[in-house]
Image (cartoon, rainbow, N blue to C red):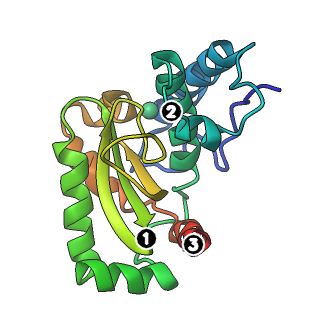
Amino acid sequence: MSFELPKLPYAYNALEPNIDARTMEIHHSKHHQGYTNNLNNAIAGTEMEGKSIEEICKSLDLSDAVRNNGGGFFNHNLFWASMSPNGGGNPVGKIADAINDNYGSYENFKVEFSKAAATRFGSGWAWLCVENGRLNICSTANQDNPLMQGECGGTPVLCLDVWEHAYYLNYQNRRPDYISAFFNVIDWVEVNNRYTAAL
Ligand code: MN
């Protein structure tokens, strides 16, 4: 058994103008495919083979190859499924109440999440997690994620890729513009489903 690149649930151009088709195509068919292939190569013939990607990420003593490519595989799966051409707008369901309880308002949540994404130096990710029943915003370097040992913990329900490969073709150095466009495509129905499952 090996991991397979998931098909995108929408066309490469479906998130335009927020995320352009060329970026989506290269990001999915080259970068995510690369992490998938390299993960399969790194675990072939080891005790990791046959484990779920969540089990792999939670393992202690990950090799650099498994950590980087296992994270790359898991993180992009969650990222693609966090967005929709019908996304954006206000959060829905129980997570809407939780955001208001934890951050005061959706507007303030956006400020906090944007800060985590904008201040991650170099390459990495911003996360919204459920930890001990509470929402938690954090960020990780490289392809690390909250399932791994590190400062960021909990069950991730939303993530944003802030590697330059995620935005540079369209936004160049303007990471804040890319972050602000991301809110226009968040699939809050999906994120709310993850949130209720994580509680
Ligand atoms: Mn990426």
In the image, residue 174 above or below residue 132:
above
Label 1 sits on residue: 132
Residue to which mark 3 is pinned: 189
Q: Position of residue 147 (x, y in %)?
A: 48, 46
Camera-side residue of 45 and 171: 45
How dense is the environment of label 2, judged by Cα within 10 Å: few (below 14), some, or many (20 and up)? few
User: From the viewer's perspective, is 126 left or right of 27?
Assistant: left
* Residue type, label 3: Val
Report which residue position mark 2 lands on: 60
User: Which is more N-terminal, label 1 or label 3?
Assistant: 1
Residue contact at pointers 3 and 1, CB within 8 angstroms: no
* Residue 13 drawn above or below residue 32: below
Say which element carries label 1. Answer: loop
Give the mark nearer the N terminus: 2 vs 3: 2
Residue 20 location (% of width, % of height): 44, 40
Label 2 vs label 1, nearer the camera: 2
In front: label 3 or label 1: 1
**Residue 98 lies in quadrant:** bottom left
Which kind of residue does numbered mark 2 sit on? Leu
- 125 left or right, relative to 13: left
Residue located 26% across and 71% down the image: 109
